[in-house]
Amino acid sequence: MKKNFILFLLICAASLSSTNLQAQSCGNRQLNPDIAYFLKMIGYQDLSLEQLRKMPIEQIKFAGPPAITYPSNDVKRIKISADSIPVLVFNPTHGKNLPIIINYHGGGFISPLLPGLEHSLWLEAKNYEAIVFAIDYRVAPEHKFPAAVNDSYSAFKWIAEHGSEFGGDTNKIVVEGNSAGANLVAVIAQKAKKDGISNKIKLQVMNGLPIDLRPKNMETSVSYQENAVGYFQTKAACYFAVETYAPNQFDNPEVSPILNDNLKGLPPAVIINAEFDPLRDDGVLYAAKLRKSGVKVWEKCFPGQIHCLIGLLPDSKVQKEYEAFIKDAMNDCFKK
């Protein structure tokens, strides 16, 4: 089980960083003691690109943390749009007119929405007093790019039209993603702008953001050099995820959304980075580019933490700080 859990977390993202970027000041290179203990507890070890390539894909695809129970009547399992995209709808408060959070999970574009992620989604809906729509988009290698993008965008449009039927307020939609899911959030927001419907998104939240999937840029990123190995998300895992998801498609803006030069008018954004994440500079770069385009950005880097803030306990000080940061952004956007 430990080995499978490690593999799942190793492929939590898929990205390669961008060129000529200076490292963001974030901490003093001291790993948080609780995270250091977490890594030791689960027996973390790095895997090389060759090891990942030789491993049966099922062993990677379905590796994940154990499932934690929660009230079964707090979730609805539905299929939406003409493509029958599986979606889980979490509403622990069973309230009405609640904010809508559309969540896109991580997993390197390889893992589906695993049972081990459901408790955290339920807890998020509870803590934010919102309805969480969790999208189980198609994944590689069976379904390479653009399958994940197509499913994610179709789901967003469907929920924007039908979210009220589940107790949601479609005037308060947040699109949110971790790792690979954060990449999809950036792409969805850009596609919505192109189609003239980005006003339906009040906030985009991206944690552990992969924004540039071009392999040539990996070696120029400061955070990639600092955190290539030893902190869960590795350079090798990023290479593997990228080549599995979108081979020879790295220059497509719907794969590497940093390549879209017209970002003006995108919804406000929250970008979460971690000191010991190889992808830290990706988030820094996109935040800067959004601001330059006039987009309001809330940006925070958590010192001592690893990719996607993995390993935090739900009641920890850092987890509460993270939630408060996002709640403040949500409240600000919903006032308008």
Image (cartoon, rainbow, N blue to C red):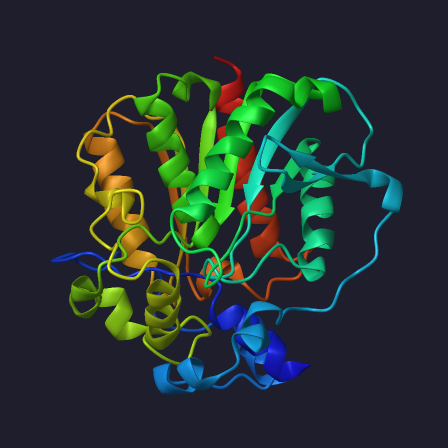
Percent of width and height locating residue 132: 66, 36
For this rendering, which residue is in front, 52 or 46? 52
Q: Work out whether 116 lies above or below 78.
A: below
For this rendering, which residue is in front, 206 or 254? 254
In this view of the protein, can residue 38 be seen by the observer?
A: no
Percent of width and height locating residue 160: 56, 21
Q: Work out whether 335 lies above or below 217.
A: above
- Number of numbered discs: 0
Quarter of the image where the N terminus is located? bottom right
- Residue drawn at x 63%, y 69% as measured from the top left: 64
Q: Residue furthest left?
A: 20
Q: Residue furthest top?
A: 336
Percent of width and height locating residue 47: 43, 84
In this view of the protein, can residue 148 be seen by the observer?
A: yes
For this rendering, which residue is in front, 287 or 103? 103
- Residue drawn at x 66%, y 61% as measured from the top left: 313
Residue 91, by quadrant, is top right
Q: Work out whether 142 lies above or below 2.
A: above
Residue 218 as seen in the image, left or right of residue 199: left
Percent of width and height locating residue 283: 32, 50
Residue 134 as seen in the image, left or right of residue 47: right
- Residue drawn at x 35%, y 54% as measured from the top left: 210
For this rendering, which residue is in front, 31 or 119? 119
Residue 318, by quadrant, is bottom right
